[in-house]
Image: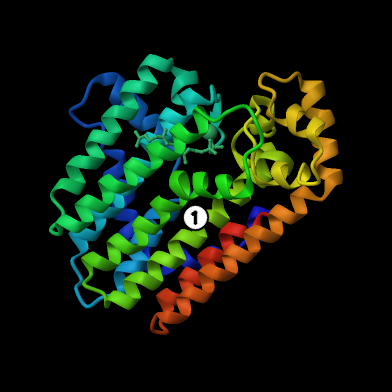
């Protein structure tokens, strides 16, 4: 599907909050080291999709308490956690491109990227620390633990194809935990009913899983410019993802060994891509992403009907639109 034809109307109910957030993100470097200031301009100069802050702002509408400043602080904190984790992840992955711009490690170097990520993370925690509810502050910290556990699980994994369950455990930690925290943390700050907090948590978790599977599918079959980062990267590095696990699920040991081999040549990546596509693994992974999208939208039925609920449903459609 072409990006232009995708419905982005889910941003509309929270456009004012998003504008304010963009202004604040642009000033995160103020008062910091000139290199940090330059990195912040580089990172936030072209805005990302801001899906996580959008989830925070929409979820806040399901409770009676309307404390705009607090909700913007949570949104900014979690977006900074996300950005810090990507800056660090790009060092780990030796990635050169993200959101169609060179990564911090490629623009400066790994040492700078390491410290810029730390700096962003500290900025995130400074915002979380002044949130009025200790349980939400704890949730931000728990989410960072989960991101680290997921990333450590990935970098320390034995060079063999993981089970489907191990893959899901990893992506729940490294991706879905943050989506869930955006929805749940915000609902808690808004004093939403416990069952609505739970419904938003279930929505966030399933949405995050669908997002990561979509990302993993696009890493195999996406268009580089539209994807904004290099395609075939997971396969080249031997990082097994769901479409690859499905491709080798008939017990093909030779295929499994070839998938997890690190540092592949371009020819080997091309050849493996052909094999994986022919196996139907990509279609199965797509179907799984759509199943999780459906689970996310089912969770929304536990919330009161209002425009923000429709926006959350549209946001879920957007997340999987690239693999439909
Ligand atoms: C991207 O995954 C990476 C993550 C979702 C999590 C990375 C987490 C850390 C580096 C630890 C936490 C660190 C801090 C400072 C909070 P991917 O490589 O599958 O996606 P990609 O293709 O977009 O790189
Ligand atoms: Mg990466």
* x and y percentages locating residue 48 in the rendered image: 46, 45
x 62%, y 32%: residue: 239
From this viewpoint, is residue 222 visible? no
Q: How is the image coloured?
A: rainbow
Q: Report whether 110 appears left or right of 168.
A: left
Q: Report whether 194 appears left or right of 100.
A: left
Choose top left, top right, bottom left or bottom right for residue 54: bottom left
* x and y percentages locating residue 118 in the rendered image: 29, 28
x 23%, y 34%: residue: 122
Look at the image and tell me in which quarter the C terminus lies. Answer: bottom right
Vertical order, 55 against 164 (above or below) = below
Pointer 1 residue: 208
Nearest the camera: 273 or 222?
A: 273
Look at the image and tell me in which quarter the N terminus lies. Answer: bottom right
From this viewpoint, is residue 217 visible? yes
Nearest the camera: 209 or 100?
A: 209
Vertical order, 133 against 33 (above or below) = below
């Amino acid at each position: 599907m072409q990006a232009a034809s995708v419905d982005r109307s889910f941003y509309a109910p929270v456009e004012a909050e998003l504008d304010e957030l963009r202004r604040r993100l642009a000033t995160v470097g103020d008062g910091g080291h000139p290199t940090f200031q330059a990195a912040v301009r580089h990172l936030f100069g072209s805005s990302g999709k801001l899906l996580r802050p959008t989830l925070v702002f929409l979820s806040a509408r399901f409770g009676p308490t309307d404390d705009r400043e607090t909700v913007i602080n949570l949104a900014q904190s979690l977006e900074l956690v996300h950005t810090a984790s990507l800056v660090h992840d790009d060092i780990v992955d030796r990635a050169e491109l993200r959101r169609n711009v060179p990564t911090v490690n490629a623009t400066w170097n790994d040492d700078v990227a390491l410290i810029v990520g730390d700096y962003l993370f500290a900025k995130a925690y400074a915002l979380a620390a002044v949130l009025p509810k200790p349980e939400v502050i704890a949730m931000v910290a728990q989410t960072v633990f989960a991101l680290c556990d997921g990333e450590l699980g990935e970098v320390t994994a034995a060079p063999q194809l993981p089970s489907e369950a191990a893959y899901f455990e990893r992506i729940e930690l490294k991706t879905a935990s943050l989506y869930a925290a955006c929805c749940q943390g915000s609902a808690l700050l808004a004093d939403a009913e416990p069952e609505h907090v739970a419904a938003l948590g279930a929505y966030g978790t399933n949405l995050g899983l669908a997002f990561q599977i979509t990302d993993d599918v696009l890493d195999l079959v996406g268009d580089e410019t539209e994807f904004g980062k290099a395609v075939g990267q997971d396969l080249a590095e031997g990082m097994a993802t769901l479409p690859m696990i499905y491709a080798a699920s008939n017990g093909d040991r030779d295929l499994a060994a070839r998938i997890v081999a690190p540092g592949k040549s371009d020819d080997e990546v091309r050849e493996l891509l052909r094999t994986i596509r022919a196996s139907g693994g990509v279609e199965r992974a797509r179907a799984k992403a759509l199943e999780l999208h459906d689970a996310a939208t089912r969770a929304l039925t536990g919330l009161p009907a209002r425009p923000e609920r429709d926006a959350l449903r549209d946001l879920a459609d957007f997340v999987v639109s690239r693999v439909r």
